Structures are given as structure tokens and as C-alpha cells.
Image (tube, helix red, strand yellow):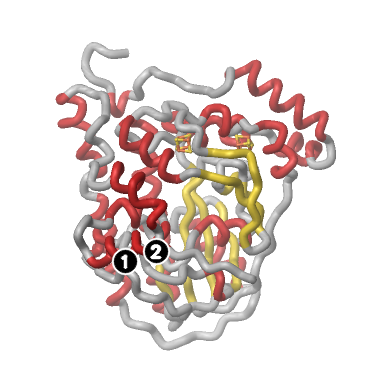
Amino acid sequence: MKTKYDERNIIFSRARLKKGTKNYHDYYKTHPQLRKEDDAIRGMNIHDKLRRSKTFKERFLPIHANNNRLLKTLHDTVEQAPLGNRIDVPETFKTNIKAITKHYGAKEVGIVKLKDEHYYSHFGGTNEALNLDNYGEKITPSYTHAIVYLIPMDLTYINRAPDYEEQLETENIYLNIAYTGARLALYLKSLGYPSTFQSEAFYLTPLVPLAYDAGLGQIGMSNHIVNPTYGDRVRLGAVLTNLALPEDKPIDFGLEKFCKRCALCVMNCPSRSIKPHQRMVNGRTFYKFTDVTCFKLWKNTGTDCGTCIQSCPFTQGIDQETIENMLNDTTLMDTVIQNHIEKYGRRKYNKAPLPIVRLEGTK
Ligand code: SF4
Ligand code: SF4
């Protein structure tokens, strides 16, 4: 039986529930086993425990402090944009749509024909930034297709994970994802096709299954999409639309076998949240993961960590020819992993701060 995800089960939704409210009471009445651990992470600002000086925080935390305002503007603009008179387009327009999405900022793009199970069953109220209160509302699937895309994060920032640079780049790319999606949704509306975009503050579907179905990568042991070119250092976006285009297919570059031999994300995870045990959801392979211990670590370090993203050999780059040769050659996989460890150790971490957050007197 196909399973729908419920956004109310996402850790961010749970952590936002306020004690004493009806939503809190209703949720933990049906999920009593989660309440104690969730209470321990409730209400903390992620940067409260960032181990940085007052000067550092005053200067650099505001770099992305206004992103939510921009997200709201983008969402309101798309929501309020009128539908144009519909123009008909041939199936070959898929090529143009992919090129236009790249023109708006995406690096790779795939198309998915939406099924019921792609959608969340209910909103989880993770959209406070947009002043929307739709917690618990049932989601009615109303779009037929998704244009799914990715934007890679800058490796020099990711290689500082779990330091603040990683968080800066994550927030940066989230906004770029929204900007790309908003432009594409506006364009499609002007062609006469109802469309919306997903952002850090508004989701109708989880993104990893969509990106897998769109052929943007495979699901790694980290439970993230691992793209053959950019590895785990990608952020995902999707525009949902009623423009029907031929769909893409999942890809297989041998990641499942590779992950079994690698497990570097498991070994490097400071909270031991990633487990190497597979679980199947709607025919896609995921891995066991404990969200609450991961989120607790974020709260205790003051950043969103990202060590698993950094640890992945594909994040650091494996050339295309080697990836093709590895597909049916597990000995080559072992050699690639061994070479990676010899070159970088268990993970490639660079502790030297980047100029963007460098204080006087530090190198
Ligand atoms: S973000 Fe950090 S704590 Fe969370 S799963 Fe990845 S490595 Fe582990
Ligand atoms: S670090 Fe290794 S095990 Fe984890 S997702 Fe990447 S390839 Fe797979």
C-alpha cells in the first residue's frame, strides 16, 4: 500500500508546537512516545548555543535574517499573479522548460507526473514565515506535474561544516531555490497554467522522493539525494503545475552498492543519527534515521551541522568516467573509497574561516 507522508510528523513541525495548545494536545495524544524528547528541543533558537563571540553574532547572524521577508514577498507575488490566456505547447516544450528553469538558476532539472502519494497528507504548519495558519489542514492534490530542480552548495562553505559557513550557504541556496521557483511559477501562470512553488516555508510534497523520481540522483545512506556530479551538497526545489510534460525516470549509478561499502556519513555523524539499515517507502530505498538526535545536535552546536553532506565522497567529486566504470565493479568502488580516505581522512574539514565571517586578527 502506498504511504503518504504527513508534514505534522516532520521534526520542524513538532518542534514548533506550543505546549498547552490544542494542536500540541492532539498531536501527542496520538504520538505519546515522541513527547518527552520533543519537549527537550522545543522553543530553542538554533543559534542560541553557537559558540562564537558576541561580535561575531552581531555582525554575521543578520546576513540571512531577512530571508523570510523575501520568501513572503515571493509567495505573495506568485499567489496574486493572474493566470494568462492558456497557450498550447507540444511535448517537445519540455526541453525549453528545462532550459528556462536553468536560466532562472537551477543546475539540473527533471519532470515528474504527480501521483497522490507524492503529496503530504496534511500541512504541518511549517509556514509561519508566510503568516499562514494551515496546521492540520488536509492537502488536496491539485497539480498534475512537478518540475523538480537542484542547485548545488559551494564546496568551500560545505567543507567548513559544522561551522557557521555551512549554515550560511544552506540559507543562501534555500533562497535561490525559492527565487528560481517563483520565477518559473510566474512564467507558467502567464502561459495560463496554474502553478505554485515550494520553498523553505511552504511545501505540498516532500522533495527527496520527487527528486529521485525526476532522475536528479539516488537516495544515499544519509537519506539525502546524492547527485552524480554534486554529491550530497545539493538543495532541491519544485514547481507544481498543470502543464503536462513527458516525465523523466529515476537514475541508477550504483549508489546503493557504493553506500554499503562507504558508510562515511554514518561514521562521521556526531549524533549517531544515521543507521545503515534500509527501509522501503513506496518502492524507494531509504535508511533508518533518528531525526530528534540530529535536531538536538543542531540546537547544541548552533548550526545545522551538515557533516553528513561534507563526508560523502560524491560531494568532494568523483569524475564521470570513474562513476560509469564503478557501476558493475565493486572493487573499483572500494578503491575510490580508499583513495578518498587517504586523501581527506574520514572527512574533508577545513577549520580556517572564510573571509565572509573572518574577524580581525584571525586567519
Ligand atoms: S546533520 Fe549532522 S547530526 Fe544530522 S544526520 Fe547529518 S551529520 Fe548527523
Ligand atoms: S557518505 Fe557514503 S554512505 Fe553516505 S550517502 Fe555518501 S556515498 Fe552513501
Residue at x 47% of width, y 78% of height: 141
**In the rendering, at what x and y percent does residue 11 appear?**
39, 51
Q: Residues within 10 Å of mark 1 (few under 14, many from 20)?
A: few
* Residue 195 circle label: none
Which element type, helix, strand or loop, lies under badge 1?
A: helix
Q: Quadrant of residue 261?
A: top right
| Residue for point 64% across, 43% down | 277
**Badge 2 amino acid:** Thr
Q: Nearer the viewer, residue 81 or 282?
A: 282
| Residue to which mark 1 is pinned | 26
Residue 358 x, y percent position in the rendering: 27, 22
Depicted 146 relative to depicted 215: above or below: below
Q: Is residue 262 left or right of residue 65?
A: right
CB of residue at label 1: within 8 Å of ligand 1? Answer: no
Q: Residue at x 56, y 41 (%)?
A: 222
Which structural element holds mark 2?
helix
Q: Is residue 337 left or right of residue 274?
A: right
Q: Residues within 10 Å of mark 2 (few under 14, many from 20)?
A: few
On screen, residue 216 above or below 293: below
Find the distance from the CA under tag 1 to the CA under tag 2: 7 Å
Which quarter of the figure is the N terminus placed in?
bottom right
Give whichever of 150, 207 is nearer the camera.
207
Say which residue label 2 marks.
30
Residue at the image position 68 percent from the left and 61 percent from the top: 283
User: Contact (CB < 8 A) between labels 1 and 2?
Assistant: yes
Q: Eyeballing the image, is 301 above or below 150?
A: above
Residue 250 horizontal/vertical position (percent): 68, 58
Residue 6 or residue 143, whichever sits in front? 6
**Is there any visible trace of residue 222 in the rendered image?**
yes
Callout 1, which amino acid? Asp
**Quadrant showing the C terminus:** top left
Q: Position of residue 304 (x, y in %)?
A: 37, 38
